[in-house]
Amino acid sequence: MMDLTKTVLGIEFGSTRIKAVLIDEHHLPIAQGDFEWENQLVDGVWTYAMDMVHTGLQTCFANLKAEVKAKFGMELTTVGAIGVSAMMHGYLPFDKDGRQLAEFRTWRNTITGEAAEKLTALFGFNIPQRWSIAHLYQAILNHEEHVKDIAFLTTLAGYIHWQLTGEKLVGLGEASGILPVDSTALDYDEGMVRKFNALTGLDLRGILPRAVPAGVCGGYLTEAGARLLDPSGTLQPGIPVAPCEGDAGTGMVATNSVRPRTGNVSAGTSDFAMIVTEKPLGVHREIDMVTTPDGAPVAMVHCNNCTSDINAWVKLFAEYSEMMGTPVNMGELYTRLFQKALEGESDCGGLLSFNYFSGEGVTGLDEGRPLFLRRPDARLSLANFMRTHLLSALATLKIGLDILTQTEQVEIDKLYGHGGFFKTPEVGQRLLSAAVGAPVSVMETAGEGGPYGMALLGAYMLWRDEGESLADYLDRKVFAGAKASTLMAEEKDIVGFDRFLRRYKAALPVEKKAIEVI
């Protein structure tokens, strides 16, 4: 029989899947559950329905319980700790009675351009459109009726944590995507709080969740929280809950990338690179400055679009296969198509695509139109076609990373990849290495991603030694014997990616024109 108090549960609300991972005292995943969902564009706003948030959470946990029962013959009545993470940023306002005042506005929206520009100028600090403070100020600028009734403004992770514990708080990394964080004070930047209050007449400290660093207890599972998570009544209240985090923070933890000069790339529906820096950087609209869960400064290149266009094409191939009377397993189809991409020409033979389902801040676009383009003399083959879409998924990320490595001279000792883009061995890893011109490592646990990282933050809260930093805990107790594969792209792949990127940049006016006319 397993001692359930020596397990930790991490749950993450990703953009296409809600996933739960249970780890044991050795920090190894032992059970999981998930629930697939998708955002919706409603009246021009990317959102998720809140009833789906609740349904997805409960279904995900029920599937985890079923796996624990099947593997260990036990009911999941308790765990040592719980942690929840979700897509960072966005906008979830509530009144004093806890009523939601506006639809959940996700990170994917590019509807706060005016607010983001004005706040960047006011703070002398880059404020991207998806940040919560930009959404709030845009609502003020739009004279939205609900603003006067806001008593609490939070993120999706902050909302779930509140429902589970009754505590209005978020982890430090998640807080840094709401409003800039002071890495010394381990709190929201007080100077920026005062500037915003003076500008708007609001009391930010009164409506924002508290910012709490990793390792501090974020409250305990209440009776109502236990019933929300497990309506069957099996799960017991009283479980300690770690401060909730964003997917950027959990990705850093899951890849042991919280020390300066380490970094990771998370690639799924969106993709982003997180590089822990040693020095302050200049203000670049393409670069976000956030923090690790324990407060170290991090340069983030965030791209709204990554695998959505790839998924659309793979589904088309699956539909064709079914029409021909040979249905295929989707996992196998993804693997074979990704592997086929490695057979393509290094610069994709003259093919080009833009994977923009939504706007993209790095390239200055508020909307997106997926495009596939080719010259008449381009070499159209399945290998080149698939390689084009994989390189397109990394192209915008590469533009942002070049600012870090070339303009700011940021040095990177280690770069880890995780997320769905890296599920097929070697392929995503090799192509990312071609993009950054550096070795890329993928750990055995890379497929677990964010929920695994959130579980590790729960473990750190429970089992760290007195005074032990998060970086030391991960090095000594979690990843000391971890297996990882490291690949360096061949020179021809690096040169080919550069040629592809030059064509990509030159063709950006085509994407902009498509947005105007389609």
Image (tube, rainbow, N blue to C red):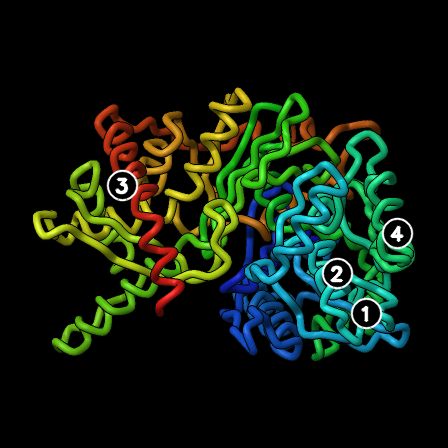
Above or below: residue 54 compared with residue 130: below
Marks 3/1: CA–CA distance: 45 Å
Query: For the residue carrying disc 3, how many other residues have a C-alpha within 10 Å: few (<14), some (14-19), or many (20+)?
Result: some
Left or right: residue 367 versus residue 310 is right
Marks 2,1: beta carbons within 8 A: yes
- Residue type, numbered disc 1: Val
Q: Are the residues flagged by discs 4 and 3 in contact, CB closer than 8 Å?
A: no
Residue 88 x, y percent position in the rendering: 64, 54
Query: Which of the two labelled residues, at mark 2 and mark 3, occupies the earlier sequence position?
Result: 2
| Residue corresponding to mark 1 | 147
The residue where tag 3 is placed is 503
Residue 259 in picture, x, y percent from top left = 63, 26
Q: CA distance from mark 2 to mark 3?
A: 38 Å
Q: Is residue 458 visible?
A: no
Q: Which residue is mark 2?
A: 136
The residues tagged by marks 1 and 4 sit, at their Cα atoms, a distance apart of 14 Å
Dot 2, crowdedness within 10 Å: few (<14), some or many (≥20)?
many
Q: Which residue is mark 4?
A: 197
- Amino acid type of the residue tagged 3 in the rendering: Arg
